[in-house]
Structure formats: structure tokens, C-alpha cells
Image (cartoon, coloured by chain):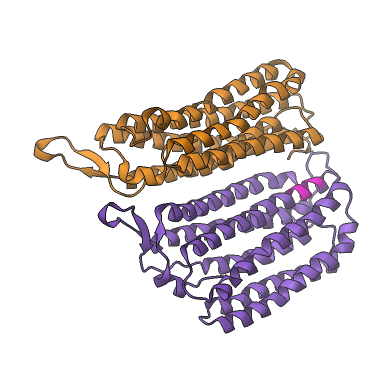
Chain colours: A purple, B orange
Amino acid sequence: MFVITAEEKGPDMPTLSTGEYTLVYNAFSFVFAAMFATFIFLVLSRAGVAPKYRNAVTMSALVVAIAGYHYFRIFESWQAAFVLTPGANGAAASYTASGSPFNDAYRYIDWLLTVPLLTAELIAVMAITGAKKTSLTIRLAGAAALMVALGYPGEIASDIGTRTIWGVISTIPFLYIVYELFVGLGPAIQQEKGNVKGILSNVRWLMLATWGFYPIVYSIPLLTGGAKLSATAVIAVQVGYCIADVLAKCGYGVIIYNIARLKSEGEPVTAAGTYAPASGD
Amino acid sequence: MFVITAEEKGPDMPTLSTGEYTLVYNAFSFVFAAMFATFIFLVLSRAGVAPKYRNAVTMSALVVAIAGYHYFRIFESWQAAFVLTPGANGAAASYTASGSPFNDAYRYIDWLLTVPLLTAELIAVMAITGAKKTSLTIRLAGAAALMVALGYPGEIASDIGTRTIWGVISTIPFLYIVYELFVGLGPAIQQEKGNVKGILSNVRWLMLATWGFYPIVYSIPLLTGGAKLSATAVIAVQVGYCIADVLAKCGYGVIIYNIARLKSEGEPVTAAGTYAPASGD
């Protein structure tokens, strides 16, 4: 699900104006700050959720911690990939490729860890129990990991044909996840009460909308002929991933927390004023 | 709401005396220390507040964590933007522009995350509940984000006309926030008891006074003709932002915590001496 491999990008990074370079730089910094702020929020707020929903909040916290780490790495790699070059004859300075490759394979490593967790936290916050919960978690998390892993050979391939083939194969587990979300999880969502039912139903659309962004970006080289990306394409891809990641990880994590909070309100409280310990914590 | 873009600043940073450079350097270091100290205080003190007010303290903690991160970055960018240059013929050494841009777009990213949180924590600590709370939070946080986002195009514009237009447009959501704070929140503040009523009333003035500082700084280039800033102007802007940020984030966060503490005193305590879990945490 990626556009540009480290190998392709290294020598081929386009020359960017200082404004273009800074836009991407600032977008990475923004996402890093959003990830760690969400992490602090989830860690601090976790104890206020009934124990059986805490696993969902813990997984949300892991997702943003992992993504925050990778954004820090991506940020550093972006800095290393460019050199500020003074313009000749009084022209504006620009950022040119330093020769050091821009490694956004970090994103694949991030996804391999976080995308299965995103599916698992959705199931953890629902009213599904026992063997059915385990089975669903394994199937959805497994399909998510498979989807990411199958996209990678296409990502590092230098020819369009190989990229297309792996892209198509990777779409199969994606479609399976969509099927499970909208058909498989339907009955379990109908069993939820009040607000929770509506929020869970909407959260599937958030997943679909944000996840759907990745295959679009993956396809850009297929449309542009796979050669060196223009400055505009590089910026669009990076800023687009940033927006998708904030929605799919921070936004989604906070929504999962809110579902857990709402569901905790109906849970019994002990004489000590705390939630009774239960499975899941 | 910013004065100088990376592009403008990079090559155009004025030459500073070592005293001038160090003053700003130390101001950044001071704010970083104030932010992380406030963060530690809020995290440690959070459990002493009744659960329904903990979200307000959590958000205060997030604000100073996010701001602390950005001040660290601003600090590093400031160091990179200057080079210590020995004076000729025995003159005093000075700090001259290194060519590396001073990126205080970090401030905009910081505000985009923290300013909506500042409005949300005020509502979280008040006696507003249910749909009204959600609606107010969305309106105020949305207006705050809009205010910051609309200021940015003016900030990065190189001509005075564009800067003025976006500055004026950005003022509209600012005025809306002021209206909501002083008119919309009026009845809810009147419902509060004792000290809390007075503190909440005053906290609005703290917001207005500290936030009002930013448009003044934003306007400096309009008054000075928009060209390269003098050393004095650069120092005034940076030190001014530092003071405003400490008041608007650390000071405000501690006041919000105190309101939460005062309100917690009236909350029921369980047999074990802890607060019962409740909505909001």
C-alpha cells in the first residue's frame, strides 16, 4: 500500500521549495504530537473504564504509541533526505535530495503492528464474548496483517506489473475485512444499546473511509507511470497519509474510548467505588 | 496568528548580540521547563479530583505536554538558525543567521491542537451536562481550530494585503468564542456555587487577555511594513509569545485544576474514601 520505496525515492526525491519541504515536515511533527497526546490521554483515562473494556483502551494506546514512534523515525528520515541548497543568483533557496534515502517503509512496519490492533480493539469494545470473540479477533487481525504483508512486495517492486498483481492480491483480505465489518458484525452491533449502537455503526464507516485512502495512494504510481514522483505528488502522498493516520488512529482511538466509557456506565461498582475486576484487565 | 514564516525568517534573521540571542534562548528553555513541570503536577494531582472533573485535568495535562514538545522543537530550531560569529578587530561576537530557517510554524501546529483543548477543558470543568455540553464543546473547539487555521494563510503570505485579509477573517471565530465565553456561558457560570463562580468568571478574562496578545503580535508586520524584522521586534515577539503561553497554558491549567478540586469537595465519597466513578472519566 505504498507509493515509493526507499530505493526509488533516495536518488529520485524531487527538489522542493522551502515551503513545500516545510509543509511535509510540519505535517509529520503535527502527527507525532497528535499521537503522543492521544497516548497520554488514553493512558490517563483508562482507569475510568470498567475493567472488561480496558483492553480496548490499552490497544488504542498501543496503536498511537507505535505510530508516534514511527512518525518520529519518518520525520528524521525526511530531514536526512534533503539538503537546503542556496539559490543561484539570488534565487530562493530550495531543498534538494541529499542522496540519503527517504525510508517510509517505516509505514509498513507501523501498519503490520497497528492495523491488526485496530481491528482487535473494535471487537474488544463490543458485546461479543467467548469463543466467538477469539475467533473474530484472529480472523480480522490475521486478514489485516495479511493485507499489509501482501502489499509490500508490490511496494518494493520496480515494475508496474508486479505492483499491480500484489496490489490486487492485497485487496482480497481488505474486502474480507469489509465483509466482516458490515455483514459479520451486524448482529452483534444490533445487540448494543442506545448511543453505542449508532457510534459502533459509524465507526465502521470511519475505518472504511480512512483505510480506503491507502489503496488510492498505492495506485498513484500506476497512474503516473511509476517513474519519479513530482513534488506535488510526494507532498500529496505524505500529507494525505498524515491526515488518514490521525483519523484512523487518534480519532478512532478516542471514539473507541468513548464507547468503552458509555458502556462502563451500566457496569456494577463495588463498595470501594471502583469497578469490579473482570476479564479483560 | 504568526508573524514570520520560515521562508521569510531563514535568510532574513537579524544579527543579534550574544545577550539578545541568549535572552530568547533562555526564554524558550524556561517555557519548556514550565510546561513539563505543569504536566507532572497535573498528572500527579489528577487522581485527587472527582472522576467527573478528571477529563478537564487530563486535557490541561495534554495541552502542556503538546506545548512542551513544540517548545523543545522551537528551541532546537532557534539554535540551528544562528551561528556565533567572532567580531572583527576585537569587536564583540554576535549571532548571525545560519541560513537554516527558524521554523516557528511549530506554534501554529501547537495552537491547532491546544487551543481547541483549552476551550474544551473550560466546559469540562463546568456544571454543564449532556447534549448541551457536547454541542458547546464542538462549537467552541471548532471555532478555535478555525481561528488558528484561518490565521495561517496570512502568516505565510509575503504581502501585507493577504496578511490583513486572513487576519480579519480569523478574527470572526475569535469574536464568536468571546461571545460564547461572556454571553453563552453566563447562565452556566451563575449556577456555580461560592468561590467557583468567581474563579470561572475570572478565568474568562485570563483567556481573553492572553489570547488577545496573539493578534497584536500578528499585526506587527502590518505596522512595520512587513519587511525584515529588527532584532528588537524578533526578541519582543518571541519573549512575548513565551509569556503568553505560560499564562494561557500553565497558569490556566492550574486554575482549571483548582476549580476541579473545589468542585470535588462537594462530591460523595465511598466507604473506601475514594470518589465513585462517574461520567467524564
User: Of residues A244 and B169, which is closer to you in this image?
Assistant: B169
Q: In the image, what residue occupies the spot 67% across and 24% down?
A: B179
Q: Position of residue B25 (x, y in %)?
A: 35, 37
Residue projecting furthest to the left: B89
Which quadrant, please, contains the C terminus of chain A? bottom right
Residue at the far front in the pictured view:
B161
- In this picture, is B151 found above or below A109? above
Question: Would you identify the image quadrant in which residue B185 lies?
Answer: top right
Q: Position of residue B126 (x, y in %)?
A: 72, 28
Q: Residue at x 38, y 68 (%)?
A: A100
Depicted A2 relative to depicted A61: above or below? below
Picture layout, residue A48 above or below residue A205 = above
Residue A127, given in percent of the width and then of the height, sits at: 85, 57
Q: Is residue B124 left or right of residue A161?
A: right
Q: Is residue A253 magenta?
A: no
Image quadrant holding the N terminus of chain A, namely bottom right
What residue do we see at 69% from left, 70% from top? A144
Task: Give the residues in magenta.
Answer: A257-262
Q: Is residue A258 magenta?
A: yes
- Camera sees residue A90: yes
Residue at left offset 84%, top offset 51%: A198
Left or right of A140 in this view: B151? left
Given residues B256 and A269, the one toward you in this image is B256
The one nearer the camera, B252 or B89, is B89
Q: Main secondary structure of the magenta part?
A: helix
Residue B133 appears left or right of B64: right
Does residue B274 show up? Answer: no
